[in-house]
Amino acid sequence: MPNDDQSGFEASVGLILEECRLALSRIDPQAVENLVDAILAADKVFVVGVGRVFLSLQAFAKRLSHPGHPGLLRGPGHRAANRGGRPPHRRLR
């Protein structure tokens, strides 16, 4: 017989899984296909973010560089510089 901690844990897992199912059900599969096609066709992918979004995008940009799609990342700590009209960026490899 499960103790209260286990049943509370199982209830939490069920709630988390239901939230994930709900979030995933709202994703348009065609939009995902379009995004994947655009990324695969691109020479470079430029991502911008701040805070927790920046951390997620940093991981995403690093994953893009694994199959050879350079990810260019712009986020906190990047200051605008005069580079012939080009924004400063960090190349992720």
Image (cartoon, rainbow, N blue to C red):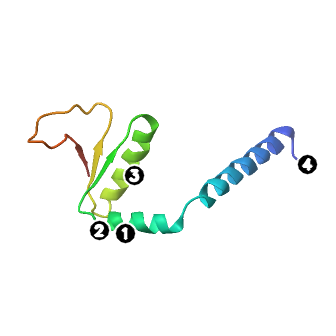
Mark 4 and mark 2 residues within 8 Å of each other at the beta carbon = no
The tag earlier along the polypeptide, 4 or 2, is 4
Q: Residue furthest left?
A: 84
Q: Which mark is residue 60?
A: 3
Please state which of residues 19 and 12 is positioned toward the viewer in this rendering: 19
Q: Which mark is residue 37?
A: 1
Please state which of residues 9 and 87 is positioned toward the viewer in this rendering: 87
User: How many residues crowd mark 3 within 10 Å: few (<14), some (14–19), many (20+)?
Assistant: some
Q: Position of residue 50 (x, y in %)?
A: 39, 36
| Residue identifier under label 4 | 1
Instruction: Give the Cα separation between the discs numbered 1 and 4.
Output: 50 Å
Instruction: Give the Cα separation between the discs numbered 3 and 1.
Output: 16 Å
User: How many residues crowd mark 1 within 10 Å: few (<14), some (14–19), many (20+)?
Assistant: few
Residue 81 found in image quarter? top left
Q: Position of residue 51 (x, y in %)?
A: 42, 34
Q: Residue at x 8, y 42 (%)?
A: 84
